[in-house]
Amino acid sequence: MISALLGLPVFFTAAAPGWARISVAVLITGAAIAFTRLAPAARPTPAKQT
């Protein structure tokens, strides 16, 4: 997520080329998808009762 946050300034500078904005948008989207796919694995699972 840090790499996605470091790419945000490209949207606020007028001198940034179009390809940079597109690539950062794709990387931010990919990071968000990866984060949401990994989030359920971080939840603790209930202990089995025998």
Image (cartoon, rainbow, N blue to C red):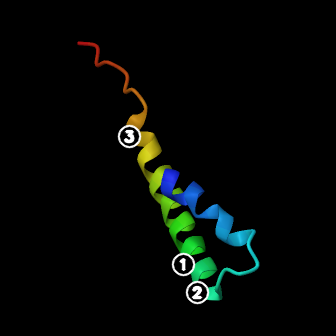
Q: Earlier in the sequence, mark 3 or mark 2?
A: 2
In this view, the residue farthest toward the front is 15
Could you tell me which secondary element the residue under label 2 belongs to?
Answer: helix
Q: Secondary structure at mark 3?
A: helix
Q: Amino acid at mark 2?
A: Trp
Residue contact at pointers 1 and 2, CB within 8 angstroms: yes
Name which quarter of the figure residue 48 lies in.
top left
Give the vertical position of 49 relative to 21 (above or below): above
Answer with left or right where residue 2 lies relative to residue 48.
Answer: right
Residue 10 x %, y %: 66, 71
Question: Residue lying furthest top in this view?
Answer: 50
Q: Secondary structure at mark 1?
A: helix
- Report which residue position mark 3 lands on: 41
| Location of mark 1 (residue) | 23
Give the residue type that dot 1 points to: Ser
Instruction: Give how far across and how far down residue 36 sits, in percent.
Output: 51, 51
| Circle number at residue 19 | 2
Q: Identify which residue, 44 or 20, lies in the foreground.
A: 20
Q: Specify the amino acid type for callout 3.
A: Ala
